[in-house]
Amino acid sequence: MIRIDTNYILRYLLNDNEEMAEIAESVLMNYKVFISNEIFGEVIYVLEGFYKISREDIALQLIEIIEWENIHTLNDDILIEALNIYKSKKLDFVDCILCAYSKFDNILTFDKKLNKCIEAKNG
C-alpha cells in the first residue's frame, strides 16, 4: 500500500501542474492508497483557505475519492460523516471528525459549537 501526502490530492483535484496531476491521477487510480485524516485536514485547509473553494464542493470531491475501492483510510464512515458535517456547519474539520466520532464515543469538550454539533447528532 502507498501513503500519499497532501500535494498528491491537491495536484489531482486542482490540475494546476499537468505533469504532477497526471502522476497523481495514475497513483490514485491504479494503486492501493492510504490517506490519513491529517492529510484530509490539510487538503481542506488549503482548498478552503487559499483557493477559496466552497465547503460543499470540497466535501463532495473528497467523499468521491474516499469511496473509490482502492482508497483506504482509518475509517471511511467517520470521514464521510465528518465531511457531511463540514459542508453544513461552521466547524473546522477536526471538530467535524470529533462530532462524527460522538456517534460511538463520548466526546468531552468546552467548545460550544462542537457541543451543539454533538447534541444535534445524538439527540
Image (spheres, rainbow, N blue to C red):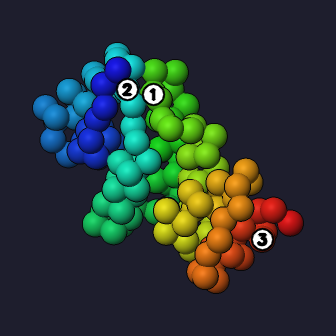
Which residue does the image show at 47% across and 44% down from the upper left? 62
Most foreground residue, 96 or 15: 96
* Residue annotated with mark 2: 33
- The picture places residue 52, in percent across and down from the top left corner, at 36, 66
- The picture places residue 20, in percent across and down from the top left corner, at 16, 34
Mark 2 in CB contact with mark 3 (< 8 angstroms): no
Which residue does the image show at 56% across and 57% down from the upper left? 97
Mark 1 to mark 2 CA distance (whole Å):
5 Å
Secondary element type, mark 1:
strand
* Residue annotated with mark 3: 119
Instruction: Please report whichever mark, 1 or 3, sits nearer to the chain's N-terminal start.
Output: 1
Most foreground residue, 58 or 95: 95
Q: Quadrant of the N terminus?
A: top left
The mark found on residue 71 in the picture is 1
Which residue does the image show at 46% across and 53% down from the upper left? 58
Density class for disc 3 (Cα within 10 Å; few <14, some 14-19, many ≥20) is: few
Most foreground residue, 107 or 96: 107
Q: Which quadrant would residue 121 be assigned to in this image?
A: bottom right
What is the three-letter code of the residue carrying label 1?
Ile
Which residue does the image show at 71% across and 61% down from the upper left? 106
Q: Which quadrant would residue 103 be assigned to in this image?
A: bottom right
* Horizontal arrangement in the rendering, residue 23 relative to residue 12 (left or right): left
Most foreground residue, 30 or 41: 41
What is the three-letter code of the residue carrying label 3?
Glu
Density class for disc 1 (Cα within 10 Å; few <14, some 14-19, many ≥20) is: many
Mark 1 in CB contact with mark 2 (< 8 angstroms): yes
Instruction: Please report whichever mark, 1 or 2, sits nearer to the chain's N-terminal start.
Output: 2
Asked if 14 appears above or below 73 in the picture, the reply is below
* Horizontal arrangement in the rendering, residue 102 relative to residue 27 (left or right): right
- The picture places residue 105, in percent across and down from the top left corner, at 70, 55
Mark 2 to mark 3 CA distance (whole Å):
34 Å
